[in-house]
Amino acid sequence: MNGFSRRALMATSMLLSVMCGKRANARLNNMPLRSDAKILVAYFTRSGNTQVIAGTLYRNLGGEIFEIRPAHPYPEDYEQTVAQAKQERDSGYEPPLATTVPHFNTYDTVFLGFPIWGETTPPVIRSFLHAHDWKGKILRPFITHGGYGVGNSLSVLASHAVGATIETPFVMEADQERRTLNEVRGWLNEIRHV
C-alpha cells in the first residue's frame, strides 16, 4: 500500500472531481496506461525522494524524463528553503523555470511528481503547469509528503493544468529530512540541558 488509505483515496477522488469542474477532467478510477502512450516523467525534488519514484517510473515505462528546476535554485539549507517557499506561496509568486520541456505537445501522458510544501504544491510546480499547454493530456501525479497529506495540491493541479484529464495520484509519505532535523534538535536539547 502506498500510505494512502482507501477511504482517503475515495474522498480525494470525489473532491478532485468536484474541484476540477470546467478546468480539468478528473477520473474516479485510473484508466489503464495505453501501450502506445508517449510518456513524459517530470518531477521536482528537494531531498531525492520524488526523484527515486521518477527514476523507477522512467525505467519501467520508458519515454522521457525531465527534472523541473527553478532558474534560481532553492537554498541548500532546509529551513531557508521552507521560509522562501512559504513567502512564495503566500504572495502567489511563481518562480521562473530553468527550462521548459522541449516538444511538450508530443506527449499524451505526463507523470508529474513533486513533494508537498506548506500543504500545497511547491511554487515551481505552479510555474511548470503554467508554462505548458495541458489540453488533451493525461496527468498522472505522484506526490510525496512529510506526514500531512496532499493539502490543496489537487486543486492546484485542477486549476493550473487546464484541459488535462487528471488521474488519481500515487501518494507516499517520505519525511526523513524533517524527521532527521527534529531528531537532531531533540538530541541537542537533551545534551544542552544536562
Image (spheres, helix red, strand yellow):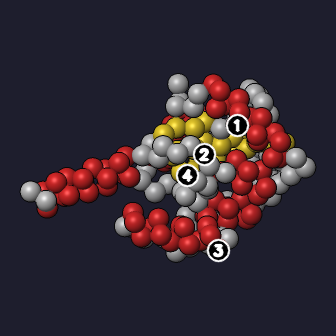
Give me the residue at 65% from left, 43% from top: 141
Q: Quadrant of residue 96?
A: bottom right
* Vertical position of residue 95 compared to residue 68: above or below: below
* Vertical position of residue 35 compared to residue 117: above or below: above
Residue, disc 2: 150
Residue, disc 4: 116
The x and y percentages for residue 86 are 54, 67
* Vertical position of residue 60 compared to residue 134: above or below: above
Label 3 or label 1, whichever comes before in sequence order = 1
Label 2 or label 3, whichever comes before in sequence order = 3
Q: CA distance from mark 1 to mark 4?
A: 15 Å
Identify residue type, mark 4: Ile
Question: What is the number of the mark on residue 12?
Answer: 1
Q: CA distance from mark 3 to mark 1?
A: 26 Å
Residue, disc 3: 91
Identify residue type, mark 3: Ser
